[in-house]
Image (tube, rainbow, N blue to C red):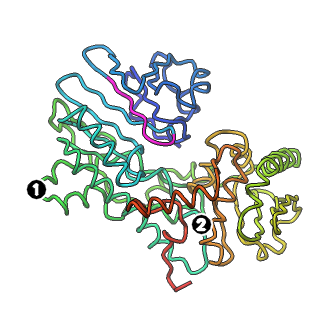
Amino acid sequence: MPYLDPLKQAGIDYIYISHGHEDHFHPPTLRTLDRSAKLLVARGASFLPEARELGFELIEVSDNEARGLGNDVVCRIIPTHGGDTFMTLTDGVETVVNLNDAIHPLPAYARRKFIKVIKRMHPEIDYLFCGHGVASHFPNCYVVPGKDREATAHKRQLYFNEVWADIASMLAPKYAFPFAADVVLLEDDLQWGNEPIHNTTRPTEVFACRLPDRSKQALDITSGFEVVDGQVTKTRLRVPLRMDDVREAYGDKIAQANRYGSVRDDNVNEVYELLKRNINGRRTYLGSFNGDYRVLIRFRGGSVGLSITKAGTDINVTKISDVEVDTGTYDVVLVTKLAYLQRSLSTRFGNDLLFVGSGGVLLYNSTDALGSGLNDEIMAMVSPFYYTGSRMRRRLKAALKRLVNRDELDLYNIKRWTVFATRP
């Protein structure tokens, strides 16, 4: 549910699309905007075929290109990792750097590398926009026995807020703004995470504690904030989130988010065949997983589901007519919408909906599977686009990183991110 009110009176000349994830490239939102605007994208971006279908003029910017946009404004789009990019704009007087979520999820050594690139291009930065989350409420979408979910949410978000402060201090802009991370989840079983995520120590607060003499550089802005010619002309700063306010303002949207259509047999059969095809295509890789497991996929609004069982190297997928029966015998139960699973199995970035915490919940029956990497196996099962590679190569790569002191915190290691109220 994107918030588009600020755009109603704005004349849009250009729209920058950083990468193909749905929280950055969302065709339904783009279709509401004036087609006279031009899309700025990295040359060769993976989402170009879908972007061309929307009717906008596309401007592809190469890695080392300084593309003029008129009125002395020059744009650069710099690739980072996994198809992501960031953008800089300058008119020779002021410079804007939009990092979206392209740098802060990276390991520290990689962040430093790109910060050096930015400083070489733009020694003086006026406005820095930097995300402070990966549009991800992982691991809050994972339900684990004994987990302290509020403490887990706080730990995860505080990590990214501290990284934001690191980036802002190293780039030293005139103004630094946290943005592109204030997402509110509306489904009933995910709403609990909104307040602890949004109201933990904010990026600007971390920055001010570390650099009190520069605290006025970091502003936690919200809609309506305005700066003109380097001077703040309208001060609108973020206030703590209260879910009571969200429920009052968006009650109809919350009801819509929690209203599930019926699950039709023909749609289940289609997803069943897609899942079997993907698993069969990856049978050698999936069969090499160290251990057996049982995974159940439950569809919201229906009683049917899909069961995935691994025994030795053999993996079987079956349809279940009553998902309420014997769910306790499964290691993990994935609860999601049928349409989300279909998109995960058929579109490049569809699996993000399931695993960043906005499209489903994963229920672990015990803590035993936390360190096994079973969540990675499920990702490989439900997305043909999920990169697997060689298990041996991944282990060697991890060992080499430890050897050269680059053993960075794995952002999607459930066991390392989960805080337990009681020892598991």
Question: SS of the residue at dot 1?
Answer: helix
Circle 1 sits on which residue?
213
Mark 2, secondary structure of its residue:
strand
Magenta residue span: 75-82
Q: Residue at x 36, y 63 (%)?
A: 158
State if disc 1 and disc 2 touch (CB < 8 Å).
no
Q: Position of residue 402 (x, y in %)?
A: 44, 64
Tell me the quarter of the picture where residue 18 sits. Answer: top left
Q: Which residue is mark 2?
A: 142
The answer to which of marks 2 and 1 sits earlier in the sequence is 2
Q: Is residue 115 left or right of residue 133?
A: left
Q: CA distance from mark 2 to mark 1?
A: 40 Å
- Quadrant of residue 121 within the rendered picture: top left
Q: Is residue 365 above or below residue 180?
A: below
Residue 341 higher or lower than 79, as above or below: below
| Rendering quarter of residue 186 | bottom right
Q: Is residue 215 above or below residue 225?
A: below
Q: Position of residue 130 (x, y in %)?
A: 34, 45
Residue 288 lies, in percent from the top left, at 74, 61
Residue at 54%, 36% in the rendered image = 20
Who is closer to the viewer here, 14 or 258?
Answer: 14
Could you tell me the amino acid type at mark 1? Asp
Instruction: Count residues near mark 2 (Cα–Cα under 10 Å), then give few for <14, some for 14-19, many for 20+.
Output: many
